[in-house]
Image (spheres, coloured by chain):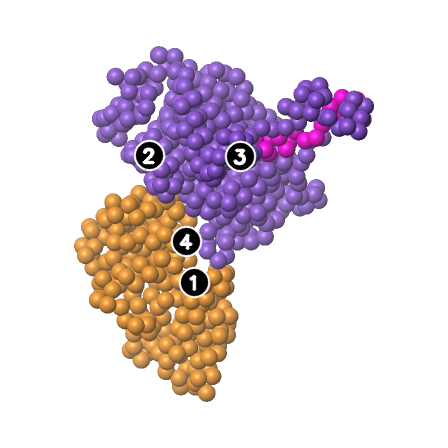
């Protein structure tokens, strides 16, 4: 039996959905001019930029969403299974700062930080996907979106959870992914990336977000709605009320998306949080935030849709017991809730900071959560009596063949980041062990190059895109990246 | 009698009771209490108390928002009376506040406005998605001391610079201090765009605003004697 965790019963889910359908009709959803004709075309009234979506039309859109789909790795093998109770994790995304590995103080992230994070995440099987994890502050902001995706594609073979900061850059990112996959059709057939698209709470699909939804659907690229109600600030203070708003934002986004291209892949995703009434902060590690994540996903599952949530993040400013308690707790809850993609590992300080050391510690929490999901299995006809038949009351279980045959299935063995009293773990705290683990993973990492013609195309793309912003020396910027120099010059 | 009503005024602010605050203001005027006395001895001490309780973590944001609402209700009665007397409300400084162009997020900025108000600043909140030109025009119209520009997104953070450029174009940059804040904003960014200060949260914004005012006018006065207002 696979263990699971639920926050809502069916009657409450039905109430949540009933109110969500009510909200999308009245007061309605603010939408951008870009999608007004699309909505009016099927008879949805749009007045003063507000769409009033009738429930039957919304239910039709929900019906046409694929119940499952895959993201593929660089080799074209399915690597992430969206749908059902499949659970995957990826690092948090789009962070501005990093905890410096030497000083453990936050500072603006730069290219070499992102490259290190990608390489470490590539080495950790706990992460089924990469993310465009950090904004590189050492390159001009205008090229930031494609630059960080390019680095991920260069150093990783895993699928990517990414997103665009503008309507324009979405198409640049799609061009880049198409080059990496060997053409648009290849990318469409075996998508390696999924794009996060965020409504603005409450109940607003902005110009840029509306456009991304439509353009992704038409390009045949999976989209992941990341609705972010902040309970008490940009959403009702009650958790149930925020889940209603989340559902309304997701359903209305799905209506826009499915009208643009029925049957296009889309994920019911969430990054909700409570709003701390003392500090005005949005604690990602609060238990109520995890409760919101789980509840939002449950509503999506009830509708049969693929799901996502933002968890495994802590709020302290340094790697300490608080941060890891919060991260570990939400990793377990997210896994038990059967959320398909759980983003956020590595992040702390209210998502303002990334840490590669935290990423490897979080990976241990994730591995434990993954073990938990396997549950307790009966192995063989007897649970215990057959082994007692062999040992009698002497109880020499260590000598049994069954012990040797089964212990690897029963026990998860964490990396040396977790102190299990092994002789080599003499002193030092978890941060020391995490530092050491990061260095070991980086030493073991070996980049698998792309085919030479695709590498050349990617570099030509970078030069071309850089020149659009008057940057004549993109090659020089890229040459700062380890392993890039040889490919460039 | 005045002491009693001042005490009730203070309590109406702490309790976040706009109807009571408004009623007491009307009663004070009817009873012949000077509007400035009602402000300085009744309502402002209430807002000070609120600000201090919030800083100590003893008051919560919804309570503080209600207090600001009560203050607004009282001032809606007292401001016209002050004008009739030809008096001006003393203030710690005039602040024009807004979220930058392209950004619709207001929470952080509203908190800053409320806390500045609680500490005696006169705050004019332009709302969200505000162009540099609009910031500059309002600052010019009010002869503002400080312009505060908030941004939540890395993309819209860049527009904080356009506000400074607009102030320069309108020729009032030298007269106005610019403070910036928001989730992605850093001290380094503030320096890079030529802002005068950066605040990491709402409480720091109050300290920063006081510091900027002392740079403008010399050492700070002991206590703000007037009240601010979120317009």
Provide the residue designation for mark 1.
B55
Q: Position of residue A242 (x, y in %)?
A: 57, 48
Left or right of A424: which side holds B131? left
Q: Chain of mark 2?
A: A
Chain A colour as displayed: purple
Provide the residue designation for mark 3.
A418
Mark 1 element type: helix
Q: Depth check: give the residue in front, A117 or A167.
A: A117
Is the Cβ of the residue at disc 1 closer than 8 Å to that at disc 3? no
Give a yes or no on whether discs 3 and 4 share a subunit: no
Of labels 4 and 2, the one closer to you = 2
Residue displayed at 62% across by 37% down: A337
Is the Cβ of the residue at disc 4 closer than 8 Å to that at disc 2? no
Q: Chain of mark 1?
A: B
Of labels 3 and 2, the one closer to you = 3
Q: Position of residue A88 (x, y in %)?
A: 55, 29
Mark 3 element type: loop
Residue displayed at 44% across by 80% down: B6
Q: The N terminus of chain A appears in which quarter of the rendering?
A: top right
In the picture shown, does residue A352 fall above or below A384? below
Provide the residue designation for mark 4.
B108
Provide the residue designation for mark 2.
A110
């Amino acid at each position: 039996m696979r263990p699971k965790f639920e926050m809502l019963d069916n009657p409450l889910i039905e109430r949540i959905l009933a109110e969500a359908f009510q909200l999308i009709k009245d007061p309605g959803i603010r939408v951008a001019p870009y999608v007004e004709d699309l909505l009016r075309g099927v008879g949805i009234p749009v007045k003063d930029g507000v769409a009033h979506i009738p429930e039957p039309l919304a239910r039709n859109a929900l019906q046409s969403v694929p119940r499952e789909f895959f993201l593929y790795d660089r080799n074209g093998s399915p690597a992430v299974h969206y749908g059902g109770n499949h659970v995957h994790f990826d690092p948090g995304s789009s962070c501005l700062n990093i905890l410096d590995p030497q000083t453990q103080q936050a500072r603006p992230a730069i290219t070499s930080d992102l490259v290190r994070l990608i390489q470490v995440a590539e080495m950790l099987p706990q992460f089924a996907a990469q993310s465009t994890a950090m904004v590189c502050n050492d390159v001009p902001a205008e090229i930031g979106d494609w630059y960080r995706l390019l680095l991920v594609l260069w150093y990783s073979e895993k699928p990517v959870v990414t997103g665009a900061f503008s309507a324009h850059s979405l198409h640049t990112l799609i061009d880049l992914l198409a080059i990496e996959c060997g053409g648009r059709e290849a990318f469409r057939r075996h998508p390696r990336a999924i794009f996060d698209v965020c409504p603005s709470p409450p109940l607003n699909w902005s110009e840029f977000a509306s456009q991304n939804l439509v353009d992704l659907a038409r390009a045949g690229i999976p989209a992941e709605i990341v609705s972010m109600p902040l309970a008490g600030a940009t959403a009702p203070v009650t958790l149930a009320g925020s889940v209603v708003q989340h559902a309304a934002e997701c359903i209305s986004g799905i209506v826009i998306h499915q009208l643009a291209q029925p049957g296009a892949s889309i994920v019911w995703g969430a990054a909700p949080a409570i709003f701390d009434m003392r500090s005005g902060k949005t604690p990602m590690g609060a238990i109520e935030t995890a409760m919101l994540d789980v509840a939002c996903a449950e509503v999506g599952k009830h509708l049969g849709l693929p799901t996502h949530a933002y968890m495994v993040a802590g709020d302290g400013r340094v790697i300490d017991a608080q941060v890891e308690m919060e991260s570990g707790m939400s990793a377990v809850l997210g896994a038990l809730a059967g959320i398909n993609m759980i983003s956020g590992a590595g992040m702390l300080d209210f998502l303002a900071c990334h840490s590669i050391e935290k990423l490897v510690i979080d990976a241990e929490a994730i591995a434990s959560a993954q073990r938990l999901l396997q549950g307790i299995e009966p192995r063989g006809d007897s649970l215990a009596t057959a082994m007692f038949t062999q040992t009698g009351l002497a109880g020499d279980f260590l000598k049994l063949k069954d012990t040797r045959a089964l212990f690897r299935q029963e026990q998860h063995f964490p990396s040396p980041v977790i102190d299990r009293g092994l002789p080599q773990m003499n002193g030092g705290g978890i941060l020391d062990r995490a530092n050491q683990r990061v260095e070991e993973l980086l030493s073991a990492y070996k980049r698998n190059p792309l085919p030479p013609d695709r590498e050349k195309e990617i570099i030509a793309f970078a030069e071309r895109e850089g020149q659009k912003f008057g940057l004549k020396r993109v090659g020089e910027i890229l040459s700062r990246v380890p392993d890039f120099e040889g490919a460039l010059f | 009698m005045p002491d009693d009503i001042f005490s009730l005024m203070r309590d109406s602010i702490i309790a976040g009771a706009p109807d009571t605050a408004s009623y007491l203001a009307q009663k004070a005027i009817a009873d012949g209490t000077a509007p400035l006395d009602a402000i300085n001895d009744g309502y402002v001490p209430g807002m000070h108390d609120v600000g201090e309780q919030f800083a100590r973590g003893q008051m919560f944001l919804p309570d503080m928002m209600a207090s600001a609402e009560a203050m607004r209700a009282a001032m809606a009665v007292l401001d016209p009376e002050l004008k009739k007397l030809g008096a001006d409300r003393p203030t710690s400084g005039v602040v024009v506040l807004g979220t930058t162009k392209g950004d619709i997020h207001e929470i952080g900025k509203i908190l800053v406005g409320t806390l500045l108000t609680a500490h005696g600043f006169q705050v004019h909140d332009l709302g969200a998605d505000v162009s540099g030109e609009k910031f500059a025009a309002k600052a010019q119209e009010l002869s503002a001391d400080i312009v505060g520009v908030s941004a939540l997104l890395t993309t819209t953070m860049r527009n904080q610079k356009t506000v400074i450029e607009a102030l320069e174009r309108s020729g009032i940059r030298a007269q106005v201090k610019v403070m910036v804040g928001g989730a992605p904003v850093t001290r380094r960014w503030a320096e890079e765009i030529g802002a005068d200060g950066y605040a990491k949260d709402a409480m720091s914004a109050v300290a920063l605003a006081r510091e900027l005012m002392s740079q403008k006018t010399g050492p700070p006065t002991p206590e703000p004697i007037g009240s601010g207002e979120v317009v």
